[in-house]
Amino acid sequence: MAENKTKPTDADVTAFLDSIESEQRRSEGHALRQLMERVTGAPATLWGSSLVGFGSRPYPSGSGTSDWFTVGFSPRKAALSIYGVYHGTPDPLMDQLGPHTTGKGCLYVKRLDAVDPSVLERLVRQAWERP
């Protein structure tokens, strides 16, 4: 089994978020961190160099199973990448969220202020509580 290269680090999440060049993404990163910490009750951890994750659980992949954060995000230049809340299957909450796109297992949001924060919170809670 290949080892997962993206692992939790001891790096300072606040310093990472503060280092984001775009003022909008920096602000959105701090806001998402607050939302996810409030919903999960777990502290933010930097995974690799650019993923902010909360909690961890076994994650099956093509090369076996490794630990991965339960929910998390990355404040990327093109969009906020939000992990753990979308699993490739229809969810009525997604229709209520606001403008977004999805990938294989990721939710992409171009502007955090364009989505419904209560729906995003429900998606995070649902993902956190999923067995």
Image (cartoon, grey):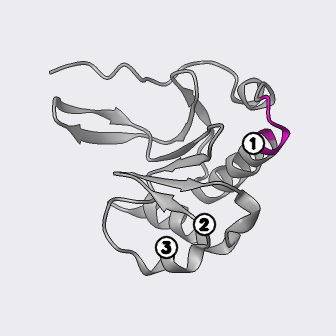
Q: Is residue 85 magenta?
A: no
- Residue identifier under label 3: 94
Q: Is residue 57 above or below residue 50?
A: below
Q: Is residue 16 above or below residue 112?
A: above
Proximity of marks 1 and 3: CB atoms separated by less than 8 Å? no
Q: Residue at x 74, y 32 (%)?
A: 17
Lower sequence index among marks 2 and 3: 3
In which quadrant of the rendered view does residue 65 lie?
Answer: top left
Compute the Cα span from label 1 to label 2.
Answer: 17 Å
Dot 2, crowdedness within 10 Å: few (<14), some or many (≥20)? many
- Residue nearer the viewer, 116 or 34: 116
Q: Residue at x 64, y 19 (%)?
A: 11
Q: Residue at x 35, y 42 (%)?
A: 57
- Residue nearer the viewer, 19 or 66: 19
Q: Residue at x 49, y 25 (%)?
A: 8
Label 1 sits on what residue type? Arg
- Residue 27 as seen in the image, left or right of residue 59: right
- Residue 79 as seen in the image, left or right of residue 34: left
Q: Is residue 108 above or below residue 53?
A: below
Q: Give x and y (percent) for residue 38.
A: 68, 56
- Residue identifier under label 2: 120
- Residue identifier under label 1: 25
